[in-house]
Image (cartoon, helix red, strand yellow):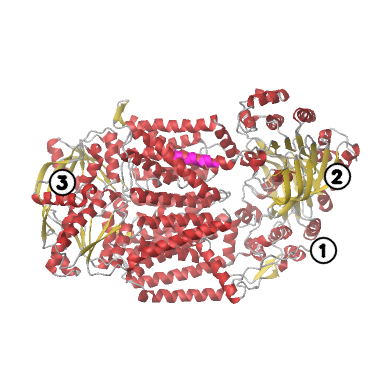
Amino acid sequence: MTNRARSNAMFSKLRTGAVIFALALVPVLGAQAQEVIKIGIPTGLSGANSVVAPSVVQSAELAVDEINAAGGILGKKVALEVADDGSGAAGAQKAADSLIFQKKVNALISMQTSAARNGMLPVVSRGKVPYIYTSLYEGRSCNKYLYADGAVPEQMVGPIVDHFMDEYKAKTFFLVGSDYAFGRGMLAFTKAYIEKKGGKVVGDEYQPMDATDWTAIISKMRSANPDAVIFSTAGGAPNVTLQKQYKAAGMKAPVGNLSVDEGTAKTMAADADGVFISASFLTNIDTSANKKFMSAMKAKFGDKLLTPNDLSVPEYDAVYLYKAAVEKAKTTTAEPVIAALAEVSFDGPRGKVQMNAQRHAPLTMYLGQVQADGSVKIVKSFPNVSPGEQCPKL
Amino acid sequence: MADLTTTPATLPRRAFSGRLVPAGSIAGLCIVAVVAGPYFLDSYTVNILVRSFLYAATALTVDILWGYAGILTFGQAAFFGIGAYAAGITFTYMDFSPQTAVLALLAGLAVSAVVAWITGWISFFHRASPLYVAIVTLALPIILVQVLYSGGTFTGSSSGLVGYNTFDLSVEAWFTICGIGLVVLTTAAWFFVNSDFGRLLIAIRENEQRCTYLGINAPRVKILLMVVMAMIASVAGYAYAGYTVVVAPEIGSFVFGTELVMWVALGGRGTLIGPVLGTIAIDVISAYLSGNLPYVWKLIIGSIFVLVIVALPQGIVPVLKTGLRRLWSAATRRDAAPCVAVPALIEAPEGRRAGTGSDAPALNVADLACSYGSLKVLEGVAFKALGSELLGIIGPNGAGKTTLMRCLSDGYERTGGTVAVFGHAIARTPPQGVVGLGIGRSFQTTSLFETLTVAESLRLARYRLDGTRMLSHAPTLALPDSARRVITATGLDRQLAIECRHLSHGMKRALELAMVLALEPSVLLLDEPTAGLTKPERTLIGSILVDLVQREGLCTLIIEHDLDFVREISTRIIVLHQGKVLLDGSVAEVVGSELVRTIYAGGAHQELAP
Amino acid sequence: MSPTVLDIADLSSGYGEAIVLRNVSLSIRPGEIFALLGKNGMGKSTLLKTVLGFLPAKRGRIKLFGEDVTALPTHLIARKAIAYTPQEQTLFQDLTVEDNLRLGLRDDRGFAEGLARVSEYFPIVGKRLSQKAGTLSGGEQKMLIVSRALLGSPRLMMIDEISEGLQPSMIQRLTEILLAERKRTGTAIFVVEQNVPFAFSMADRYAVLKIGEIADDGVAGDELAAARVQDQLRV
Amino acid sequence: MTALVLDIVTTAAILFAVASGLLIILGVLKIVNFAHGGFLTIGGYSGLVVTQLGLNAWLAYPAAVVAGIVMGAVVERFVIRPLYDRPLDAILATWGLGIIIGQLITIVFGREIQFVQTPITGATSVFGETYSLYRLFLILAAAAVAGGIAALLNATRLGLEARAVIMNEPLARGLGINSGHVRFVTFCIGAGLASLAGALITPLSSVDPNMGVPWLVNAFMLVLVSSVSLASLAIAALTLGGAQVLVSTFISPVIGGLTIVVLAALLLRIRPAGFGHG
């Protein structure tokens, strides 16, 4: 190639780039056209949460479709704005910046990592929009604009630990988590709970959120030889790699997993066979509300349906809870909507959900066990479990 | 006397003072823009720009390190992270107050300075490869992130720290503060890189080895620079933590470190304004586009980056600038680069020459050996040389002549024996230290600084004795008499503003000699000073050398192939052969030696015609 | 009539901006032994490096076997049935003798036959095949270099200061081998030397290079020329 | 104890397999290929394609090698070739290339984490310890890679020419070796090896578009301390990888993640030749 030809090629490439910029700007500029209620969904489309995030978006899409088909909220259509938060704090800040200040959403409703949620909260405070957090999490995240409709340790840990102690006569436990707010918080509660019940924690180990090599921890587990192990990693890759490597290492102690959802369990199938999980939602819940929800999801997404799970279904509930609150407050203005959110309830696939316990919701919990085909069998249910002390000051 | 002058192909570079006014007015305009910005921009853009400004300030430090001093660093992200975490941790555990705000700032500065110093100390040592610093600075953010991870709940591990109390400032106030900060920083950086000291950085980038032989402690200069740049990055990180109220491992990560380098490369390394504009443009555009075209956007950035590195290594801004300048001169029919003033040459004070008054021989070499693995290049070399001696070193290829020069000028080179300069053993002294003992060395292949002017090159040689200015140019250039004579005799004094790469080969050799003389050495080591010169040029250099030795009493060692030339100028000749001194004697003795003749002509076993 | 083996016309070359060779012209005919003489630093090696394409010609033209190779990349020039032995770093020190020899051919065909042939000249080479080249003595290394050059039966050999540091007896032996090889294959040989007697003992023609220019040239046979050249090269 | 030894050996095997492609490229081309992470990713996704097509899991390995070689050929021709004289720029350009590869994969396969089937599942008993069969298989795989490279270098004409180019490129060219061609082929093989390594490591974890990046730095460090020798690389992988396992097991996995980088950087400071002799 001659120099001239090379520079020509380069300029044509640059020109192509410029055209793409220009095209990309069109939707940005045309964004604030029609009067709609916009719900922002910053979620982990990439990174650790990318395994579950698409199912969260599906839940929200069904809720919005149903609401719009029934006339919207206060007569306005509802629109979704999805943004990738990269499953981390910095990405979540960028996503929230964009959703709140650029897309001007009326509320944020999303399942995110704890890191992302914490990272976003200062932006939410500055942007002053209601924020419903829909993930199960370590608890005690309190902010004027924040509500949560997922499960907290008080609701999740008991069923698994009790089951191990009763059915497996487990005395010694080994805990493994991802080193961030969720992993640490969940396992701190678990440890206290086990010790309160007379069990012993023979080891607790943490790895960074993006770690995928668990060799050293598995060999520690091997030498500690516990009666049962409990995992609480970030969702997605860490979860799956830990489970896979645990299985491949030939470890036999029963596993309780506080962060695996049914969808992820399904993709792992044989690797997760026998794992106990604790959830406020399982696809097999035998209620008419759940059956209706499941068939609506199947109808809407067909082949593309991602298994609804304990991380995605609260998103569906939360969109309805937000609708009820706006209708009660008769406005989308933040302050009245926030006040109304504690008072409204929604009867959905998880049963009746109302976030009236210090910004959190009492929930019906299920102990499930993953089967060889990846489906989850309900072992026991625990109605109306209280989230306990979460945000006494709010 | 012959004149080495050739008409330069290009005009001299524009002077500093000529660009002072435009630079000042551009800075002023920028300040007006950042003050007025919040009134014109929507809140989202203002919000994004605050972050971009802080990134740009950090990119600026990468540019100074990489673009000017040639230190490819991935580590500035770590210092940004240190500053940010200093704020995050302090405000989380000690709450926010004016006192803790100052404390956090100072803590960030101190920690990054110490870490930078250690990094520099590890990276920059005599004969370190330029790749090594890239490796160490690559490791730095990785180490920082792991340290943050292992901090558990104290550092918040993967989640980082959020929600601490911080400065109670509006986004607009942050915008103005960060904007002004960036303009001031960029302006200061501009003065810095265009000062005499900035030229020193470029010299180190272009030819560090030559710098050390000019008595410049390049490792120390680089460590200092790294410390200062780390502190600036730390302040940017501190502001980031104060503004965003979140610190997470990502901001100190290796990926952020590489992004900074990418922004600098795209904008144009070594241009200051390029990296600043590049960073802001890319960060703002990506904030707008990443939501809509997340993958495509990163793909475009990646592709442009590769394209720029391959086809436009100087980056985009310089290309635009050249285009604009061409347009400008076409429109105004005026040349954009006016001729400018150069520093006035003045007489350097006398008497700083090392070894004056010493009784010891200027150079005392005993049992010198040098080997590479099993290959013995020099063995048992011993000789003394005195002031006013012009010692010719001759010998066939591979006899070890250049290695001898190396061993005399760098304490790390020899593998055995001693070298003493006026009675001081050079021990394991790096070249910059040996220069301090009074040795000046010129190189076999011309070793200059391509983009520095003649005056700047000479000033560099004076750095050891006269120091340098950090933010401006000295109006005068003091040179010893000997260097001035070389300059005037060759006509270099009329070309002080010409960049070295535009000089003719002969002029380069003359400049090289003048630079060595500007060091005020007592012992001069010249490695083929006349290689590649024409006959008249050789004669001129030869007469200058003889004059120098006679007038100033310099001890001079000269390697030459041209035996006629050596014969004409030397007072004594040493013949090296296969790493040993074969003969050490007067010119007549050596020239008359049968032994030398056979070595040079090869036919050891044949009778030769007289 | 077969074309000139090597034809250099008006060649200028050097390193960077320094010009080392100025307007050099010379030509070598098939089967001819041509000696280029000169002191250190006069441009002899530079000339060979330019012919091989290691250095770009600043001016002029180089033809090999009638074909213009001035702008050709080194490896293509080297494949034109020529064998080049540089003055320094002539062997792969960490490779075995056998590997060094194999690299003298473009592929492994004909290796056995070539090896048998050069082993006749230098029996030691055939006996030390698995030894690292770097562990050979200086003289043995020279034998290996020459063996590698002879292996491919080239039509032109370019040999840069092979005699340096060699025993007189070894030089004698080398002269005989090169002459025998020319007789066998008709190869042309371009020797670059400082050792005038060695060069003149086999050369047909010679040229003397002084500061990058040809200062003298002629037919090598006569005693007067030898004396004159010797004088030009002495201290 | 047995498990610890096995952990060290298997970790070293994985590191060796991952770093070998980088090593031969650095050796012959004198270029640090930061797109190495991208090539690992390509290998991982080759495995994913094999999984998605429902083919035999063993096919992932040849598929990865082919994909790596093809990609390597394109990259060498258009990006690497102009940068032979600018090694620092080559680091940057190949890093950018890694980003491009990651984004292209994202566009084609989506950015979520996906899983690849494992050709060997389960555990076996080794000296009384239950141990992952796949990790044991990786020891074999690494040995095969090492044997393959050694055979290629020592028993083929190309290997001989490559070694000649490594040791003394001008002389090699003077003997008629087309060093450009040797570089091209070497780069392709290096890319193929990287891709194979990517396919080998994915059954242990998962594939995502940035899966190669965490491996890159460790591989880079190992290659630098082994000064372009296959044997030294094996030693470096065993000692530094062993140190990593020990630190992870007895101190903390987080500090363990630093071990290779820190030890390698210090080693290079003290002894620039690393584990190589020189």
Label 2's element?
A: helix
Q: Amino acid at mark 3?
A: Thr
Residue D266 in sight here: no
Magenta stretch: give its range. D183-194
Q: Mark 2 = which residue?
A: C232
Q: Amino acid at mark 1?
A: Met
Q: Residues within 10 Å of mark 2 (few under 14, many from 20)?
A: some
User: Looking at the image, which residue is at 21% across and 51% down?
Assistant: A301
Residue A164 in sight here: yes
Considering depth in this image, is B222 or D181 the residue closer to the camera?
A: D181
Q: Mark 3 = which residue?
A: A283
Q: CA distance from mark 1 to mark 2?
A: 28 Å
Is residue D191 located in the magenta-colored stretch of the structure?
yes
Label 1's element?
A: loop
> What's the mark number on residue B1?
1
Where does residue B385 sit, x and y in percent of width and height? 76, 49
Considering depth in this image, is A34 or A41 the residue closer to the camera?
A: A34
Query: Which quadrant of the figure has residue D47?
Result: top left
From the image, state whether disc 3 or disc 2 is nearer to you: 3
Where does residue B313 sit, x and y in percent of width and height? 53, 57
Considering depth in this image, is A3 or B513 the residue closer to the camera?
A: A3
Chain label for disc 2: C
